[in-house]
Amino acid sequence: AVFNEFNQYSVISHLELLKAECKALNLQKCYSKICVSLLRYTKEIRVDKTFLDAGMACKDAKIYNMAFILLNRYLDLAEAIEETEGGAGGLQDNTAFQDTDIPSQFDTPLPEKNLLPEAKRNEIRDWILQVSLDQKAEQKLGLRKCEQCGAQIYEASLICTKCSKVWEPCIASGYPLLKQSATYCKSCQKGALKEFWTEYVKATQHCPWSVSYTHLRAHETREDLVCRLLLEKK
């Protein structure tokens, strides 16, 4: 249990570091998927910011069905923060997030204050209303087929709710590492989905896992090793 908890926090730390790097480098595909992947950890990280970031990233990437659902949930969370009573459990409609690995609202702590002022939240409301009126997007999360049982499941889920198949997260996106789309780093042996590996490595010339300091050792040259050992002696 302790190892599993440590491994989970290691993944969260990695994704947060990678998220910041991909945003700075304008790697839109990786960035939007990382933001969505972080939703499965909203018991550990700030829930309203995670939904806001994921929704805005999907909006910028023109993934409007995901943006619509995620920004709607952000606004629900913002209202729950204002009301305070009942916490996130006051969010009655959780239909869109059933059969996903996104934590239930009953398990999610709410922050004390809102991130955005009312004016900014109204801009998001206006966009959601416009999308709804234009019927620009299906009002549901993206789906994919389970590799094992063939069921249609939430695209970012690391576990199939039908057959309990489990996937490792892609180190470049946080999305499930599907066999037919996987590639592996020759240094650390970690896996990534080819599409996101290509976008990231083309821009950075290094493996995504190397942004996590604890795994730099799998990638270091002899010169890097000497420098690290000298630093660790100080």
Image: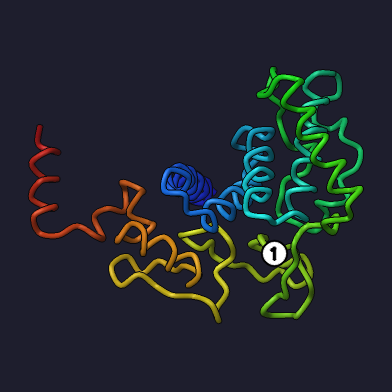
Q: Is residue 6 visible?
A: no
| Residue under the point 49% across and 46% down | 19
Q: How many marks?
A: 1
Q: Is residue 158 left or right of residue 149?
A: left
Q: Is residue 92 left or right of residue 13?
A: right
| Residue under the point 86% across and 45% down | 94
Q: Quadrant of residue 157?
A: bottom right
Q: Amino acid at mark 1?
A: Glu
Observer-nearest of 219 and 195: 195
Q: Quadrant of residue 63?
A: bottom right
Q: Position of residue 196 (x, y in %)?
A: 49, 65
Observer-nearest of 105 and 199: 199
Q: Give the quadrant of the C terminus.
A: top left
Q: Is residue 93 visible?
A: yes
Judging by the rendered image, the residue that carries numbered circle 1 is 155
| Residue under the point 75% across and 21% down | 119
| Residue under the point 19% across and 57% down | 220
Q: Position of residue 186 (x, y in %)?
A: 30, 72
Q: Position of residue 158 (x, y in %)?
A: 63, 62
Label 1 sits on a secondary structure element that is: loop
Q: Quadrant of residue 107?
A: top right
